[in-house]
Amino acid sequence: MSLPDGFRYLPGYFDRQQQAALVEAVLEAVKTVPFYRPCMPRTGQPMSVTMTNFGPLGWVTDKDRGYRYEPAHPGTGAPWPDPPELLTDLWDSVAGYPAPFEACLVNYYRDTSRMGLHIDRDEEATNAAVVSVSLGDKARFRLGGPARKGKTHSLILSSGDVVVLGGEARRCYHGVDRIYPGTSTLVPDGGRLNLTMRRVTNP
Ligand code: SIN
Ligand code: FE2
């Protein structure tokens, strides 16, 4: 089986110093928009990752109102901070889209966190690629096709790697099976940060 068209893997895109600067930006952000534990729509089941965001919009979810984009943190009400320039530059270089991203979701994976197979489908701008950066511990990323039951590929993502889901891959199932605790010293206290940039509205 071949990988879906529009999937790009850019290993080692960011060097150690840039990775450290990105972690620093997250640690600065969480002073006003702390990591919070999102819950699934309807069931209220808590997710195993915690989250925050950069940008004019942030992806949030809770039991009552479900998946959506909001301009402010659900707990503190503070606006999501501006993204670091390393991320806007990354988007400009790899997204191939004529407008900036609006949301950068920050997922924080601890030892047993995972992300079930899903398609990103809460955006109007479905023709814009999703661009994501891995920081810290390695993770096993899984990429399938447009149907939940199809075949999947797995790929180990390391700190500094970038993944682009454009074209057909934009509408493909993907998730994170597991992380490999203790495989990086980048994130204080360990774990993995994933930064996912998305255009939400049609420009
Ligand atoms: C996601 O698709 O929401 C996260 C992907 C990742 O953590 O690499
Ligand atoms: Fe996703």
Image (tube, helix red, strand yellow):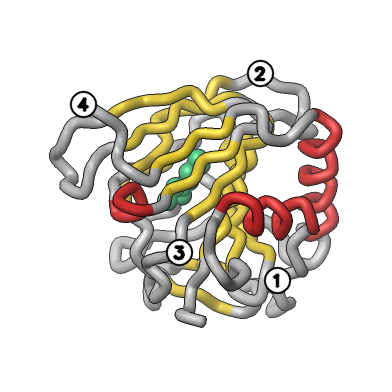
Helix, strand, or loop for circle 3?
Answer: loop
Q: Which residue is mark 3?
A: 128
Question: Is the residue marked by circle 2 packed among few (<14), some (14-19), or many (20+) residues within 10 Å?
Answer: some
Q: Amino acid at mark 2?
A: Gly
Question: Is the residue marked by circle 1 packed among few (<14), some (14-19), or many (20+) residues within 10 Å?
Answer: many
Report if the CB atoms under discs 1 and 2 are less than 8 Å apart.
no
Q: Is residue 143 above or below residue 65?
A: above
Asked if the beta carbon under badge 3 is closer than 8 A to the nearest atom of ligand 2, the reply is: no
Q: Which mark is residue 80?
A: 1
Q: Quadrant of the N terminus?
A: top left
Q: Amino acid at mark 1?
A: Trp
Report if the CB atoms under discs 3 and 2 are less than 8 Å apart.
no
Marked residue nearer the N-terminal end (3 or 4): 4
Marked residue nearer the N-terminal end (4 or 1): 4
Question: Is the residue marked by circle 3 packed among few (<14), some (14-19), or many (20+) residues within 10 Å?
Answer: many
Marked residue nearer the N-terminal end (1 or 3): 1
